[in-house]
Image (cartoon, rainbow, N blue to C red):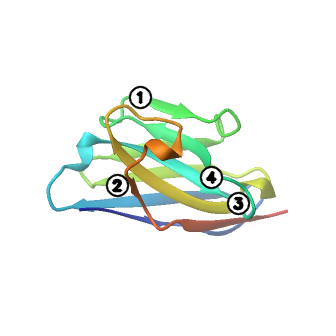
Amino acid sequence: QVQLVESGGGAVPAGGSLRLSCAYSASRRAFSLYSMSWFRQAPGKTREFVAAISASGSSTYYAVSMKGRFTITRDNAKNTMYLQMNTRKPDDTAVYYCAAKVGQYSSSWSDYNYWGQGTQVTVSS
């Protein structure tokens, strides 16, 4: 069973920074077997892709609106993935979720097998 736990959310003024973490634990499969992604969901909106990283960490992919502002990384030795956020506007306010899947990463939430419970990020103007 795979468990993902996000942390690091909170309130930040527009233009501020936050670093989210996603801690992985499982009884069998190693963290390094999974591609990982961040998604977010604002109130009344559908879940939105933010960024993805390959299992090795050598390849990343960003949603157009996040590229240049957010940075996804992972530390396989620590079983943890990160999202460095340089917020720009209150539109970044959402619950941020991490997700895991075996194989190539994807920007489609339905392709992911495992999800964390989410962490709230609130950006004020």
Front of the two marks 1 and 3: 3
Query: Could you give the CA–CA distance between mark 3 and mark 4, rounded to whole angstroms?
Result: 8 Å
Earlier-in-chain disc, 4 versus 2: 4
- Mark 3 burial class by Cα count in 10 Å: few <14, some 14-19, many 20+: some
Q: Amino acid at mark 2?
A: Thr
Q: Secondary structure at mark 4?
A: loop
Query: Type of residue at label 3?
Result: Ala
Whichever of labels 3 and 4 marks the residue nearer the N terminus, that label is: 3
Q: Is residue 125 left or right of residue 3?
A: right
Residue that mark 3 sits on: 42
Q: Nearer the viewer, mark 1 or mark 4?
A: 4
Q: Residue at x 57, y 59 (%)?
A: 96
SS at circle 1:
loop
Residue for point 47% across, 35% down: 106
- The quarter of the rendered structure image containing the C terminus is bottom right
- The correct choice, above or below, for 118 with respect to 66 in the image is below
Does the residue at mark 3 contact the one at mark 4 (Cβ under 8 Å)?
no
Task: Give the spatial CA distance, label 2 vs label 1.
Answer: 16 Å
* Residue 15 versus residue 61 in the image, above or below: below
Q: For mark 2, give the secondary structure.
A: strand
Q: What residue does disc 1 label?
A: 59
* Picture quadrant of residue 45: bottom right
In the image, 21 versus 111, the foreground residue is 111
Q: Which residue is mark 2?
A: 80
**Image disc number at residue 47:** 4
Q: Position of residue 41 (x, y in %)?
A: 64, 57
Within 10 angstroms of label 4, few (less than 14), some, or many (20 or more) residues?
some
Distance (Cα) linking label 1 and label 4: 23 Å
Amino acid type, label 4: Arg
Q: CA distance from mark 4 to mark 2?
A: 22 Å
Horizontal side, residue 89 vs residue 5: left or right: right
